[in-house]
Image (cartoon, rainbow, N blue to C red):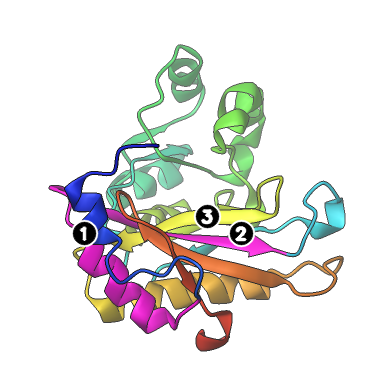
Amino acid sequence: MAFVGKRLKKAYTGVNRDKAISLTDAVKLIKAGATAKFDETIEVAMNLGIDPRHADQNVRGVVQMPNGTGKTVRVAVFAKGDKADEAKKAGAEFVGGDDLADQITGGMMDFDRVIAAPDMMMVVGKLGKVLGPRGLMPNPKLGTVTPNVAQAVKDAKGGSVEFRAEKAGIIQAGIGKASFSEEALVGNITAFIQAIAKAKPAGAKGTYIQKISISSTMGPGVKVDPSTVTL
């Protein structure tokens, strides 16, 4: 049997892992149990009634967290001329073209998001084998291929969260920090779930949102009753 420390035992206090409760009550429990020595990330996991192996059942997109994520996001932008200047002013850590591509090919991966102006996709396309497996390849559907690179940089740093269903139809993402207020976390989680609901694919049959749970980095998961979330 795995060893369970005092901190984790305390975190489990009051948590019935088999019972789904309201979102508000779940957030209260998660915050109370997030007692690690660092600011734990609050994560949401959702089981969807889809089969991502079918093209008409893919769920992917991006949603802006109304209260930010509490995470520092480092951005690389492929742009030139005025757009490159705009990206730098917006706060992008890395901006360039072929020179930036060469750095990435050489192993430089000190960024969390990649944004590209449409006219730079010929350059970015060559990095598919490097960026693709890491989920960093720019995509118009995610707003990371756009003529407005400055706004995309601001959105990324302001709290945009990308989501994509895994093979088992599970979506998970970090949406905030334990130090956030209950109201801020409820607002972020609601925005995330609403975005998933709106992204329901035409090929999905039966119950779409099957399970929702939230947890902190070092704490137990708490099931959320989907009916308590405003969609």
Please tell me which residue is depicted at 64% across the width and 22% down the height of the picture.
129
Where residue 1 sits: x, y (%)? 40, 37
Q: Quadrant of residue 124?
A: top right
Q: Which is nearer the N-term, disc 1 or disc 2?
A: 1
Q: Amino acid at mark 2?
A: Gly
Query: Residue 151, can we see it?
Result: no
Q: Residues within 10 Å of mark 2 (few under 14, many from 20)?
A: some
| 135 to 108, vertically: above or below | below
Where residue 119 sits: x, y (%)? 62, 40
Q: Nearer the viewer, mark 3 or mark 2?
A: 3
Residues shaded magenta: 20-48
Q: Quadrant of residue 210?
A: bottom right
Tell me if residue 82 is in the magenta stretch.
Answer: no
Residue most extreme to the top: 106
Q: Which is nearer the N-term, disc 3 or disc 1?
A: 1
Q: Residue 82 versus residue 186: which sits nearer the camera?
A: 186
Please tell me which residue is depicted at 46% across the width and 57% down the height of the picture.
161
Where residue 116 sits: x, y (%)? 54, 42
Name the disc covering residue 182, or none.
none
Q: Which residue is mark 2?
A: 61
Name the disc covering residue 172, or none.
3
Q: Residue 209 versus residue 138: which sits nearer the camera?
A: 209
Q: Residues within 10 Å of mark 3 (few under 14, many from 20)?
A: some
Where residue 187 sits: x, y (%)? 38, 79
Q: Which residue is mark 1?
A: 10
